Amino acid sequence: MIDFIQGLLRLRRGPWEMLATIIIAVGVFMLMQPFVMWAFTYSFITTLIGTVMFIVVSHFPE
């Protein structure tokens, strides 16, 4: 856990890509659930933010 936080603070690719992937997965989950309307409403923007974040952080150093 400490390595993950240090990787985030040092702007390393691995932890930031993992975080972006989790955001994308949360956005897809929000899109597929039928119960909470606000989650469905913000699912596209959440997935879009995760995708753009993944593209940006893929240029970070290893």
Image (tube, rainbow, N blue to C red):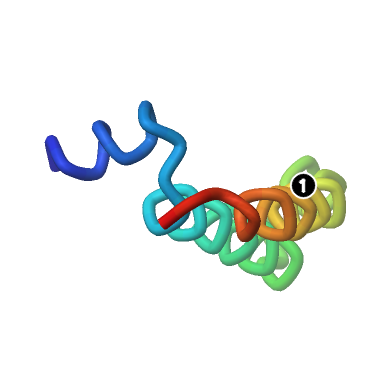
In this rendering, does residue 36 appear at all? no
Residue at the (77%, 47%) spot, across then down: 49
Q: State the residue in front, 32 or 17.
A: 17
Q: Is residue 5 left or right of residue 38?
A: left
When asked about the image quadrant of residue 24, the answer is: bottom right
Q: How many marks?
A: 1
Residue at the (38%, 35%) spot, across then down: 8
In this rendering, does residue 17 appear at all? yes
Q: State the residue in front, 30 or 46.
A: 46
Q: Residue furthest bottom?
A: 32
Q: Residue furthest left?
A: 2
Q: Position of residue 42 (x, y in %)?
A: 81, 45
Residue at the (82%, 54%) spot, across then down: 48
Residue at the (73%, 59%) spot, across then down: 55
Q: Is residue 25 left or right of residue 28?
A: left
Residue at the spot of label 1: 49
Q: Is residue 24 left or right of residue 7?
A: right
Q: Quadrant of the C terminus?
A: bottom left
Q: Amino acid at mark 1?
A: Ile
Disc 1 packing (10 Å; few <14; some 14–19; many ≥20): some
Q: Position of residue 59 (x, y in %)?
A: 64, 55
Q: State the residue in front, 10 or 2.
A: 10
Q: Secondary structure at mark 1?
A: helix
Q: Is residue 24 above or below residue 42?
A: below
Q: Position of residue 7 (x, y in %)?
A: 31, 40
Q: Quadrant of the N terminus?
A: top left
Q: Residue furthest top?
A: 9
